[in-house]
Image (cartoon, rainbow, N blue to C red):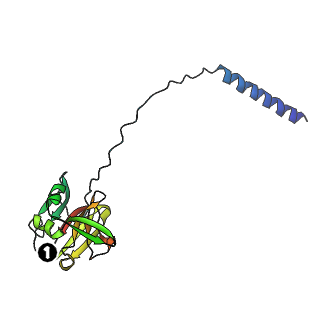
Amino acid sequence: MKNSILTVLGLLFSIALLTACSGTAAEATVTPTVTTAPAAPVAVYQPQLVKTATRFPTMLPSAVFQIVSPTGGVSPVTLTALKNIPQVQITVEGKTAAGPRLKDVLTLVAINNYKQVTFFGSGNLSVTLTADQITDQTIIDLTYHGVVRLASPNISKLQWVPGIVKIVVN
């Protein structure tokens, strides 16, 4: 009984000390700070170069992608240049895609003979087409939500490389 009385007295003494300490503390003043959020950035698709073992020159800011010729020459291709090439439409699985023929794009940078063409897109996605897979229906699609991509009825839609950043011709 004596222990419980001492315990209760100890608790009461502790409570009294805590309430005494809290009453003497200076009240903190709150100063409101008004800040304005920065303007939201405009979403602009900027293709990123795919990292490979071979080093290529940095892509020009106005270029959509670059084409590497069989001799190793690198040619940047702009959206304006792509739009100035005659456009064609293809329909695959009920979806329409439009843009210049791949053959015309390669001719733009003086490439007429090739065995295969490899497309590198954003996210390290790539696909290689042989010369016989490239037909007049193989295009650079300019109508896919502002992203330039490969499109062809001769390959699966899963292989339509979106966000083309580099085309390597062999």
* Closer to the camera in the image, 142 or 30: 142
Q: Is residue 130 above or below residue 150?
A: below
Looking at this rendering, what residue extends furthest in the left direction?
110
Judge whether residue 25 can be spotted in this image: yes
* Closer to the camera in the image, 50 or 100: 100
Expressed as whole percent of the image width and height from the top left, the position of residue 68 reads 15, 65
Q: Is residue 54 above or below residue 19?
A: below
How many numbered discs sit on the rendered protein?
1
Judge whether residue 53 can be spotted in this image: no
Expressed as whole percent of the image width and height from the top left, the position of residue 8 reads 83, 32
Task: Classify 10 Å Cα crowding around label 1: few (below 14), some (14-19), many (20 and above).
Answer: few
Residue under the image location 10 percent in, 69 percent down: 111
What is the quadrant of the C terminus in the image?
bottom left
What is the quadrant of the N terminus in the image?
top right
**Mark 1, secondary structure of its residue:** loop
Q: Amino acid at mark 1?
A: Tyr
Q: Quadrant of residue 66?
A: bottom left
Tell me if 13 is positioned left or right of 88 in this view. Answer: right
Tell me if 5 is positioned left or right of 114 in this view. Answer: right
Residue under the image location 32 percent in, 75 percent down: 156
Looking at this rendering, what residue extends furthest in the bottom direction?
132
Expressed as whole percent of the image width and height from the top left, the position of residue 36 reads 40, 32
* Closer to the camera in the image, 25 or 151: 151
Residue under the image location 15 percent in, 64 percent down: 86
Residue under the image location 29 percent in, 63 percent down: 162
Expressed as whole percent of the image width and height from the top left, the position of residue 78 reads 17, 56
Q: Quadrant of residue 165?
A: bottom left
The residue pinned by badge 1 equals 114
* Closer to the camera in the image, 71 or 4: 71
Q: Is residue 94 above or below residue 43?
A: below
